[in-house]
Image (cartoon, grey):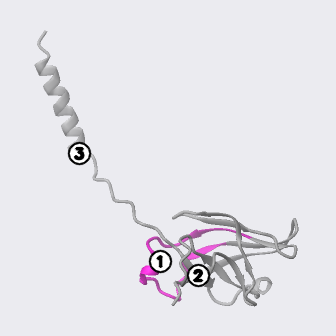
Amino acid sequence: MNFKPIVMLALLSIGWTWSVSPPQKAKERFDPDGSFWFHGTPPKEFQNVGGINLNSKRVRRLPAAGVELTNGKRFAFKSLTVKRESLVFTTVTAGGTSYSFSGRFLKGGVYAAGDLDPEAPVLEGTLTKWNGSRKAAEASVKFTYFGGT
């Protein structure tokens, strides 16, 4: 049996499949490190929250990661998941209080690159304040981005 025609047909089929497959896009780099401040006036229950800080690379010019209050107190993250599609975290408990957030990023890319409108929201979701295991406050919120100075 002559295998040459079968091999040629197989190679042609593979080549045709490769040529008609759509080109793969390079995955866009995503890096949201920086500070997220309330878009507009914070909800009454969260007036003491200054913002959410992400600093995965522990860059000195950025605040330490966690939820920062307006009095300077910081709640470090106990659990944190940052993906292009979502941000989910829970903070450690201090003085019986902790915070959690579940939301989504509205834009991709490298946030510190400077091409974001400082007045436009880039993150939205639900922020919750806990007193022990009791939900003390919860609000749907939006945040703008500040990359530091």
For label 1, the residue is: 111
In the rendered image, the vertical position of residue 51 relative to residue 131, given as above or below: below
Callout 3 crowding tier (Cα within 10 Å): few <14, some 14–19, many ≥20:
few
- At 23% from the left and 42% from the top, the residue drawn is 18
For label 3, the residue is: 20
Query: Farthest residue in the front direction?
Result: 60
- Along the line of sight, the residue nearer the viewer: 84 or 17: 84
- Along the line of sight, the residue nearer the viewer: 72 or 31: 72
Q: Identify the element where label 3 is drawn.
A: helix
Callout 1 crowding tier (Cα within 10 Å): few <14, some 14–19, many ≥20:
some
Q: Nearer the viewer, mark 3 or mark 2?
A: 2
Give me the C-alpha separation between circle 1 and circle 2.
10 Å
Callout 2 crowding tier (Cα within 10 Å): few <14, some 14–19, many ≥20:
many
Ranked by sequence position, the earlier of labels 1 and 2 is: 2
- Answer whether labels 1 and 2 touch (C-beta < 8 Å): no
Left or right side of 6 for 61: right
Ranked by sequence position, the earlier of labels 1 and 3 is: 3
Q: Position of residue 105 (x, y in %)?
A: 55, 70
* Residue 103 within the segment the image draws in magenta: yes
- At 62% from the left and 84% from the top, the residue drawn is 37
Q: Position of residue 64 (x, y in %)?
A: 63, 78
* Residue 110 within the segment the image draws in magenta: yes
Left or right side of 24 for 9: left
For label 2, the residue is: 35
Name the amino acid, label 3. Val
Give me the C-alpha separation between circle 1 and circle 3.
35 Å
- Along the line of sight, the residue nearer the viewer: 52 or 38: 52
Give me the C-alpha separation between circle 3 and circle 2.
44 Å
| Magenta extent | 100-125
Image quarter in which the N terminus is found: top left
Name the amino acid, label 1. Tyr
